Image (cartoon, grey):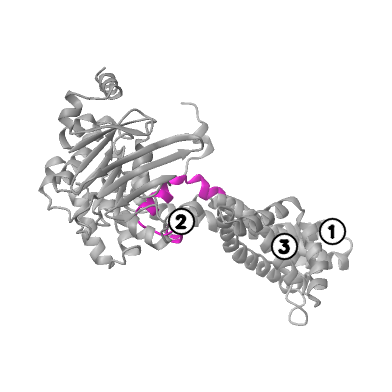
Amino acid sequence: MIGDILTILRDNWLLLLVGQYPNGPLGGFAATLLLSALSIALAFPLSVLIALARLSRNPLLLWPSTVLVYVARGVPLLMLILWVYFMVPLLIGAAVPGFVTMLVTLVLYEGAFLSEVVRGGIVALGRGQMEAARALGQSYPQALLYIILPQALYNVIPSLISQFVSTIKETTLGYVINVPELTFAANQINNQLLTKPFQVFFLLAIIYYAVCWTLTFLAVRLERRIARRRAGPAAAPAPLTVRQLTAEP
Amino acid sequence: MTSDAEMIPDVKIAETSNAGTAMIRFENVTKYYGAYKALDDVTAEVGRGEVVVVCGPSGSGKSTLIRTVNRLEEIASGTLTFDGESVHGPLKAAALNRLRSRIGFVFQSFNLFPHLSALDNVILSPIKVNGAKREVAKARAMALLDRVGLSAKAGAYPAQLSGGQQQRVAIARALAMEPPAMLFDEPTSALDPEMVGEVLAVMRSLAADGMTMMCVTHEMGFAREVADRIWFMDAGRILETAPPDAFFSNPQHPRAKKFLSDLRH
């Protein structure tokens, strides 16, 4: 079994790594990473803007952002992908590459979900911080930039990471619109071998797990670093574990 | 702590251009929360250099009143001027920010910025709002932290400070904007009893320097000793204004009499 997996890896590592590139589009692991990184990099700033729009009293900001969040929450991602895949070329009258379709859909979908995480973080701070900043003469954007967002975003790092990891896993759905990413490459291999689906897809699972674990690991390190910098070395206790919180006295 | 605060040189109290007028002036100010009348036709003024203590039972509108001065609360009708400028008029956002930057405000719950050190709490707004040079803001912040007895805690984060220390940093933070007046909204109500004194000492020394102050507080000892005038509020109205001696020894309004006798028990 492990021998099979190593053989599959040895025979197909280039396909798994970059797909048909340079003879075809970039695919495989590289495409998955690129799609994930771009999705997260674009969805996160978008989510902050959506969250702020959702907290705004201006109906021109409030309504579109609220509709986006409700649609994204209420429709399965796969359906959204198919909609964008079939509708957008009709609307703009030009073919759209699968990679772009997938990227746009993921950015909107994840932007909507992340925005609720960010909004929760802002609301949880309470009014006092904003009031203190404004009472000192700071403008609303200044208060957001220097006071509210640094605290709100730090506090929601765990939820942000879950959502980022979800984004990586959702790139697999690109498979249904023929985006040649990692799952697509694995499926190609499976179709050639025919007899070893378990080994192929087990290998695929390991690769995804490694990527998601790496992101989580980096995020935890970042979180600790910020905590240390903010509290000073003397008073930066490790976050309490569940065991500590629930221990009998 | 008290001796520390007194040894430090005076705070600079900003010169203002409208010297003839009251510092804070309420004229027929009314405010509702839904159908509830939180402020009922309030007319009063705080003179330059005057220390006014606002007292009254909880729910009487004291905090609401003080929060209208820098427009943390909107009013329904009436006019409110600070240093001759209308606070609740049709102000542009930038003008309101400028006005607010000149009104020191100290909260009951301190509201220090927990992600910034004490020093950074104090220098942030002078740098970002007033465009002060970092070194200048820092030197001034250190002098202010020294004044409130906390220069040794400049690098500490709010979570590492006691409540009394946090509130003193909050006062230094407000003073850093060089406001011509300071508002205190129950500054000692969230403190453990043994920490009340250190905060009151700072406020006392500010009053001695001639700072215009409006304080909502339940510290009647402080009111008696430091206030020039007491405003007694109930049900959104100012029922009595009097110098502290007269107010405490011979309150005029029946509601004030009852309030003071309840306090003694």
Q: Which secondary structure type mostly characterizes the magenta part of the structure?
A: helix
Residue where numbered disc 2 is placed: A150
Q: Which mark is residue A197?
A: 1
Q: Report if the CB atoms under discs 3 and 2 are less than 8 Å apart.
A: no
Instruction: Tell me: B253 left or right of A18.
Output: left
Using the image, name the chain to which the residue with label 3 belongs.
A
Sequence-wise, the earlier of marks 2 and 1 is 2
The answer for how far apart the CA atoms under marks 2 and 1 are is 47 Å
The picture quadrant where one finds residue A16 is bottom right
Sequence-wise, the earlier of marks 3 and 1 is 3
Q: Is residue A141 magenta?
A: yes
Which type of secondary structure does the marked residue at label 2 adopt? helix
Q: Nearer the viewer, residue A2 or A199?
A: A199
Crowd band around label 2 with a 10 angstrom C-alpha radius: few (<14), some (14–19), many (20+): few
Amino acid type assigned to the residue bearing label 2 in the image: Pro
Residue B198's x, y, as percent? 21, 38
In the image, the segment drawn in magenta is A120-145
